[in-house]
């Protein structure tokens, strides 16, 4: 076998399908998490191809392991393509030792999360000003947005009538994103996908898994986004996570009212991606669903965007005292 895992006890149990396939495997030497990459998966954030992304990601994962970040143990293949990756039947695979029961933590993990984010952000600070290029994927010109809405009206798309109420908010937030792309001072290499489904429970506590999306980002803006996601947007929960981040040595000071701008950036970028699919300019990603689901999602986002931006500005005000830390 490509990873010399011993004799299987039963077959592969499929546990996740998304940008990759994942299985659980039990053998005579233990339990393992097996991940298979789709050949069409691109470089995401580092290079043009999947192997470019994985090369950067695995090197950063190695740094995290050496620094004592709570990371699952990777398994070295017998004949690696690079790092911990093997090729089986024309497809790339990785294997980790199985961690706990594979479920996300259900208790208060604020202290662990704040501390872990600081650990990760200290692994590779880049000492440069300005956000990486993937941030600008959310920024489209006013002419592009006008053209999209004009096409929507011609096609009688279900969301075409939301033009007037949403466009001023879209243009304002994308202008703010473009400005911060030039001035953000705290760019680091980071895990890139701090989300609940990438935290699993081990006997010793939470473990951060799935390091394939390693990318450069602002430390403060990622901390704001992660706190918002794990706190469910609830001010006290968000504040608690960020308080532990600051207590562990994290710095939110420069971000001010833009602390949660990464949340808004994601909303606007995904909105643009769905609009392009709705208008026939791009193929749908696996996670988008069918055309009806995409049109519904575009409409829901357009209707909710003004309120979402107000919520994020209010939240930044409520958690503003943390910047003094």
Image: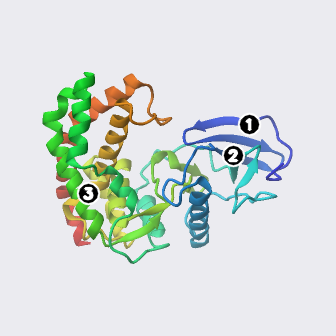
Which residue is denoted by mark 1 in the rendering?
12
The residue lying toward the viewer, choosing from 154 and 13, is 154
Q: Residues within 10 Å of mark 2 (few under 14, many from 20)?
A: many
CA distance separating discs 3 and 1: 44 Å
Residue placed furthest toward the bottom: 127
How packed mark 3 is, by other alpha carbons closer than 10 Å (few <14, some 14-19, many 20 or more), is: many
Q: Which is nearer the eye, 53 or 196?
A: 53
Position of residue 217 in the picture relative to residue 52 (left or right): left
Q: Separation of disc 1 and disc 2 at Cα? A: 9 Å
Along the polypeptide, which appears first: circle 3 or circle 1? 1
Q: Please provide percent x and percent y for residue 10.
A: 80, 35
Pair 3/2: label in front? 3
Q: Is residue 274 above or below residue 1?
A: above
Above or below: residue 33 compared with residue 192? above
Pick whichever of labels 3 and 2 is earlier in the sequence: 2
Coloration mode: rainbow
* Residue 306, position as x, y percentages in the image: 18, 41
What residue sits right under mark 3 in the picture?
Answer: 177
Asked whether residue 77 appears in the rendered view, the answer is yes
Decide if residue 157 is in sight here: no
Q: Could you say whether the residue bearing mark 3 is in a helix, strand or loop?
A: helix
| Quarter assignment of residue 211 | bottom right
Q: Which mark is residue 34?
A: 2
Q: Tell me, yes or no, whether the two marked residues, 3 and 1, touch with CB atoms within 8 Å.
A: no
Q: Earlier in the sequence, mark 1 or mark 2?
A: 1
User: Badges 1 and 2: C-beta atoms under 8 Å apart?
Assistant: yes
Helix, strand or loop at label 2? It is: strand
């Amino acid at each position: 076998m490509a990873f010399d895992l011993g004799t299987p006890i039963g077959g592969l149990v499929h546990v996740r399908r998304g940008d990759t396939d994942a299985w659980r495997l039990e053998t005579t030497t233990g339990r393992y998490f097996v991940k298979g990459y789709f050949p069409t998966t691109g470089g995401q954030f580092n290079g043009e191809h999947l192997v470019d992304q994985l090369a950067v990601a695995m090197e950063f994962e190695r740094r995290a392991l050496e620094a004592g970040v709570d990371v699952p143990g990777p398994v070295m293949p017998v004949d690696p393509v690079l790092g911990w990756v093997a090729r089986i039947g024309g497809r790339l695979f990785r294997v980790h030792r199985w961690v706990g029961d594979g479920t996300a933590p259900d208790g208060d993990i604020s202290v662990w999360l704040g501390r872990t984010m600081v650990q990760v952000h200290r692994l590779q600070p880049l000492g440069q000003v300005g956000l990486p290029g993937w941030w600008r994927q959310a920024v489209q010109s006013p002419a592009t947005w006008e053209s999209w809405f004009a096409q929507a009206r011609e096609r009688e798309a279900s969301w075409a009538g939301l033009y007037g109420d949403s466009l001023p908010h879209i243009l304002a937030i994308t202008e703010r994103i473009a400005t911060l792309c030039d001035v953000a001072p705290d760019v680091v290499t980071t895990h890139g996908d701090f989300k609940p489904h990438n935290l699993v429970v081990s006997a010793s506590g939470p473990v951060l898994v799935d390091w394939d999306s390693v990318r450069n980002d602002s430390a403060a803006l990622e901390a704001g986004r992660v706190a918002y996601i794990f706190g469910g947007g609830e001010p006290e929960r968000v504040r608690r996570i960020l308080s532990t981040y600051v207590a562990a040595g994290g710095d939110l000071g420069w971000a001010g009212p833009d602390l949660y701008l990464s949340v808004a950036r994601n909303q606007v970028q995904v909105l643009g991606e769905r609009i392009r699919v709705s208008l026939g300019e791009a193929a749908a990603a696996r996670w988008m669903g069918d055309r009806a689901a995409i049109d519904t999602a575009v409409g829901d986002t357009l209707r909710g965007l003004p309120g979402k931006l107000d919520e994020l500005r209010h939240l930044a005000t409520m958690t503003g005292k943390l910047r003094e830390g």
